[in-house]
Every structure is written in structure tokens, then in C-alpha cells.
Image (cartoon, grey):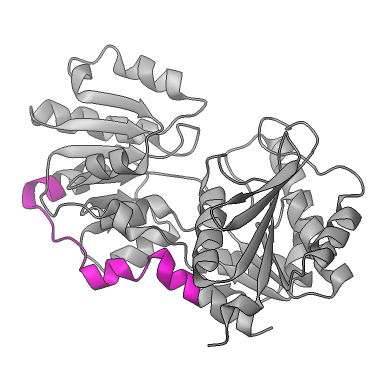
């Protein structure tokens, strides 16, 4: 492998921590992994305050942008691509990294790469058109995908996909064959006990389509039958008030905990030996929550999403439920609680650590 210090990668993205989200955490962890290996890393993201600073080895540049639309997405100001091209040329960037086809900064990143004649590596996190939105928003998002999104996917030098389903979506939308680059986690931060318990966990946004309602339905059955069992909802979102209202009248409400957002050590403690319920109906990428659960020694009951299918093929502690009704979910959960499970082998868990994925990304850089 060549000297990583030869490379200077610019991540050009809409959002970056402290904003919370799976994509933001992916970019954050990958940037840190590359910087630790000796690669020079600059992150360019939109934010309220412009300016740059060093974030433990990663130079972060925040650009002024339009106000958020629907609290989700904003646009760079006119002339951003030209100004950014001059800046990145001056600091000696060698590669451009963009993430998810529909973000405005992905288009900017590809344009900058073409202007500077640099290789661009686009990572696709989506596995389908946007779901769980109004018909109007759905139609608009498809239009964006079939114009700007298709441009990003077809123009990038290399396209990576965080799951097999994302790979298939890239093929469907652009006709290109993407290289699978699975999501990853900090395995050490989530390593937990092999001891099983009567804890049920929902970990994710409390929003339409994520499945908190089904998780609560499973919890009602399990908690009524098992006096020592508990249910934990970790996350926040637009429907948190609806969740809390549904919990309030239950006779075992004191054993149902709505935590909101928690830090990794707290999540690890709750996940350790628990059963994670993942009834999502959204177009998921490669959910790191499932990797975190397996790392913590938890079992998983999930819909047929890419990460669950991948894990279920490797370890028996992950169960995929295809039926869209409460009964099979309750049955699968009860079976795990009654029979227990064998945690995933340590070498398998280690395979989805960011240290491994960082080396894979370095290999991609070497190809250009």
C-alpha cells in the first residue's frame, strides 16, 4: 500500500456533526479513520456560521447556506462551486468525496472535481426513492433523483454503495455498477455482555415508518406476560409525543422508558443482552443500529432490510420477519427470550469496525 500521506481528501457534504444522523456519523467516522491513517482530510459542510477549524486532525470548513427547508435540507449560496474550487486547489486536495445523490453539496462536489480534474468518489447511502412522505414531496424527490441524482451517480469517477440494496438502486437509477462499501461502527464502543435479559429496545428516530408502533405492540404482550421485562425507546422525533401518550395509560408504563437521544456508553448498556426490535418500513441503507446491537451481544428482530438480511445469513441471533402483522413479531421475540441466543463471534463483529473500512477506502484512493 502506498503512503497515505500522499492523499488529501475533501469531503463535500450538506451536514456534519454535531448534527445527528446516520450519514453524518458515517462521514465523521470515515474522516477520522483516514486522518488516523495519515491522510490529510478536509470536510466542507453547510452551517449557520462560516469559518474553519481543526477537529482533532480533520479540518472542518462551514459554509453559509440558505435556511433549512422543512427542517431537513438547505442549499449552498450562489458561486459556492467556484469559490470552493479555488480554495481546494490552494490547499492541495487530491480527491473529492461526496455522499448521497440528492444533496445539493453532492452536485457541488462533483462539479468542483470536474473543474479541478480530480477523481471523485461518491458513496450512495439510499436504497430506494424517498419513502414515508406526502405524494407531492415524493414526486419532487423523484424528480431530483432523476436529474441531479442521476448526474451525480453517472459523473462521479467511482461510486460506492453502503449495501447491496443501495448498489441495486444505483444500477436502477444510473445504469452504473457500484462497489459495495458496507457501513461500520466503532466496535469497541459497543462491545457488551453475552448475558441475555428480558429487555426490549427500539433504537431510531420516532417518526412515521420507523415502526415504533409495532415495537410498542410487541412490548405490550411481552411485558404483560413477563413481570421482569422492560421496553426502552432510544431516539427522538416528530411522533415522540404520540408514543408517550400511548404509553401513559398502560398498567406497566413504569417499565417502558422513552429515553430520547443517548450517548454511546448509555446505548451500549441498554443494548447489552437485549432484543432489538427494528420494524422499519423506510428505505434504509445499511443500518448501523443493527451492527451496534450485534456488537453489544443483543439479538435482533427486523423487517427484511439489507443489514438484517446480511447479519441473519451469518449469525442465528438475528431474525428477519417478513409478515406485516404483530403476531409473527411477538412470536419471534418470545422465542428468543425463552430460548436465549448465542452472540455473534468476535471475529465477525470485528469485521465491521471502522478500522477495517478505513483500509478499504484507502484502497479505493489508490486506484486513482
Q: Give the range drawn in magenta.
A: 335-359
Q: Is residue 22 above or below residue 184?
A: above
Check residue 343 for magenta coloring.
yes
| Quadrant hosting residue 48 | top right
Residue in view at x 56 percent, y 58 percent = 57
> Farthest residue toward the bottom?
1
Foreground pick, 209 / 77: 77
Residue in view at x 62 percent, y 83 percent = 366
Q: Position of residue 53 (x, y in %)?
A: 66, 47
Residue in view at x 86 percent, y 61 percent = 85
Q: Using residue 92 as the reference point, say whether residue 319 is left or right of it.
A: left
Q: Where is residue 149 in the image (x, y as percent from the top left)?
A: 75, 58
Q: Where is residue 237 in the image (x, y as percent from the top left)?
A: 49, 29
Question: Is residue 162 something one can see in this rendering?
Answer: no
Q: Using residue 148 as the reference point, say whether residue 230 is left or right of it.
A: left
Check residue 68 for magenta coloring.
no
Question: Is residue 49 something one can see in this rendering?
Answer: yes
Q: Is residue 50 above or below residue 307?
A: above
Foreground pick, 145 / 98: 98
Amino acid at each position: 500500500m502506498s503512503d497515505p500521506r500522499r492523499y488529501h481528501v475533501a469531503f463535500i457534504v450538506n451536514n456534519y456533526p454535531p448534527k445527528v444522523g446516520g450519514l453524518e456519523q458515517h462521514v465523521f467516522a470515515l474522516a477520522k479513520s483516514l486522518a488516523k491513517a495519515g491522510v490529510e482530510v478536509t470536510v466542507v459542510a453547510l452551517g449557520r456560521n462560516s469559518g474553519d477549524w481543526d477537529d482533532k486532525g480533520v479540518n472542518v470548513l462551514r459554509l453559509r447556506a440558505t435556511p433549512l427547508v422543512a427542517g431537513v435540507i438547505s442549499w449552498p449560496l450562489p458561486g459556492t462551486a467556484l469559490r470552493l474550487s479555488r480554495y481546494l486547489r490552494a490547499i492541495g486536495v487530491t480527491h473529492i468525496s461526496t455522499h448521497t445523490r440528492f444533496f445539493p453539496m453532492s452536485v457541488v462536489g462533483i462539479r468542483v472535481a470536474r473543474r479541478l480534474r480530480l477523481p471523485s468518489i461518491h458513496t450512495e447511502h439510499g436504497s430506494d426513492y424517498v419513502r414515508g412522505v406526502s405524494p407531492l414531496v415524493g414526486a419532487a424527490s423523484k424528480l431530483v433523483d432523476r436529474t441531479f441524482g442521476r448526474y451525480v451517480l453517472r459523473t462521479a469517477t467511482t461510486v460506492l454503495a453502503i449495501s447491496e440494496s443501495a448498489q441495486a438502486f444505483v444500477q436502477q437509477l444510473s445504469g452504473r455498477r457500484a462497489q459495495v462499501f458496507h457501513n461500520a461502527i466503532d466496535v469497541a464502543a459497543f462491545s457488551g455482555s453475552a448475558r441475555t435479559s428480558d429487555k426490549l429496545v427500539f433504537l431510531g428516530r420516532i417518526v412515521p415508518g420507523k415502526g415504533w408502533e409495532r415495537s410498542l405492540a410487541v412490548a405490550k404482550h411481552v411485558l404483560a406476560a413477563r413481570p421482569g421485562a422492560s421496553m426502552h425507546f432510544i431516539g427522538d422525533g416528530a411522533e415522540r409525543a404520540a408514543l408517550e401518550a400511548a404509553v401513559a395509560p398502560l398498567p406497566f408504563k413504569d417499565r417502558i422508558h422513552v429515553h430520547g437521544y443517548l450517548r454511546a456508553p448509555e446505548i451500549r448498556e441498554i443494548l447489552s443482552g437485549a432484543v432489538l426490535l427494528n420494524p422499519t418500513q423506510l428505505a434504509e441503507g445499511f443500518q448501523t443500529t443493527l451492527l451496534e446491537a450485534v456488537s453489544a451481544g443483543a439479538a435482533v428482530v427486523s423487517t427484511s432490510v439489507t443489514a438484517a438480511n446480511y447479519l441473519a445469513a451469518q449469525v442465528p441471533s438475528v431474525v428477519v420477519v417478513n409478515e406485516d402483522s404483530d403476531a409473527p413479531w411477538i412470536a419471534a421475540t418470545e422465542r428468543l427470550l425463552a430460548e436465549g441466543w448465542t452472540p455473534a463471534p468476535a471475529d465477525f463483529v470485528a469485521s465491521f469496525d471502522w478500522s477495517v473500512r478505513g483500509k478499504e477506502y484507502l484502497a479505493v484512493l489508490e486506484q486513482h
